[in-house]
Structures are given as C-alpha cells and as structure tokens.
Image (cartoon, helix red, strand yellow):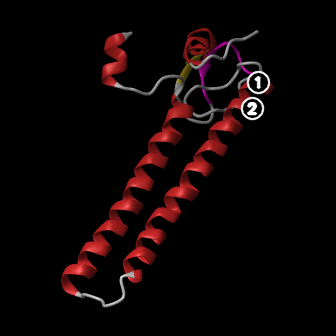
C-alpha cells in the first residue's frame, strides 16, 4: 500500500481522481499564463499604472477559482450516483451498471469491471455497500 501511494497519490476510483487531476492542470495553466503575461509586460512593455498587473493576475486566478468548484460538483455528482445505484458504478467512467452482471465490459468506456474488486476502490475513500 505504501508503494502504491508513492507511485500515485490519488486514491479511490479513477472516475473521481481524474477530475482532480484535470482541474489542477487547468488551474496551473491559468496561473502560469497570468504570471507570464505580467512578467512579459513588465519587461517588454513597461506601464506607469501598476494596476494593469493586478488586473491581469485577477484574470489568471479567476479561472482557477471557477475550475475547482466545477471539479467539486463533478465529483459530488459521481458520489451521488454511487449512493443511488448502491455501488454499482463503473470505477473508470461512472456508468450505471445496475442492469448488468457483476463482471463484464462497461458499455460506456470499454474497460472490464468487477464490482467486487471495484468495491475495494470505493472503500478507499470511505464508501461501503452498507
């Protein structure tokens, strides 16, 4: 278990941590673009009004402020679906597997699933079939 946490710090099913990874990447890109714009303007096009820098940084941080709540809502929707289906979700894509067998291929993403093995992934984040 310790080695797995060193390799990937994300725990639980991929349908949840994939969203976190994308949100983090988009937020970093927004902040880096705003920072690069401020540095470029200060070096190549100096302005007498410093408020331009603050305005650009605000535009850079605004997407980061919007991206994380959207990611939170996506994860919350997946958890609600898990509760609604009583744990019968594809761990990869979040597809509802209530009408399908306990093992097989997910019709949405094409990956194999086994609800007993997937239950261990959901248990890592504190969700059990109770």
Label 2 packing within 10 angstroms: few (<14), some (14-19), many (20+)? few
Q: Residue at x 53, y 22 (%)?
A: 12
In what quadrant of the picture does the C terminus appear? Answer: top right
Q: CA distance from mark 1 to mark 2?
A: 5 Å
Of 99 and 85, the residue lying toward us: 85
State the image coordinates of residue 67 (x, y, percent, origin top left): 55, 54
Q: Residue at x 25, y 87 (%)?
A: 46
Residue 16 lies left or right of residue 6; in this view the side is right
Residue 45 is a magenta residue: no
Q: Quadrant of residue 79?
A: top right
Q: Residue at x 70, y 38 (%)?
A: 77
Q: Are marks 1 and 2 in contact (CB under 8 Å)?
A: yes
Which span of residues is magenta-colored?
Answer: 98-106
- The residue that disc 2 covers is 80
- The residue that disc 1 covers is 83
Extreme-bottom residue of the structure = 48
């Amino acid at each position: 278990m310790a080695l797995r946490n060193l390799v990937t710090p994300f725990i639980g099913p991929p349908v949840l941590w994939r969203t976190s990874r994308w949100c983090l990447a988009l937020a970093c890109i927004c902040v880096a673009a705003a920072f690069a714009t401020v540095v470029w303007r200060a070096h190549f096009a100096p302005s007498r009004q410093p408020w331009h820098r603050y305005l650009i940084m605000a535009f850079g941080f605004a997407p980061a402020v919007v991206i994380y709540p959207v990611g939170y809502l996506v994860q919350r929707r997946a958890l609600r679906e898990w509760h609604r289906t009583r744990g019968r979700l594809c761990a990869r894509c979040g597809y509802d597997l209530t009408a399908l067998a306990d093992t097989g291929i997910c019709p949405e993403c094409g990956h194999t699933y086994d609800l007993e093995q997937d239950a261990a992934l959901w248990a890592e984040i504190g969700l059990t079939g109770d």
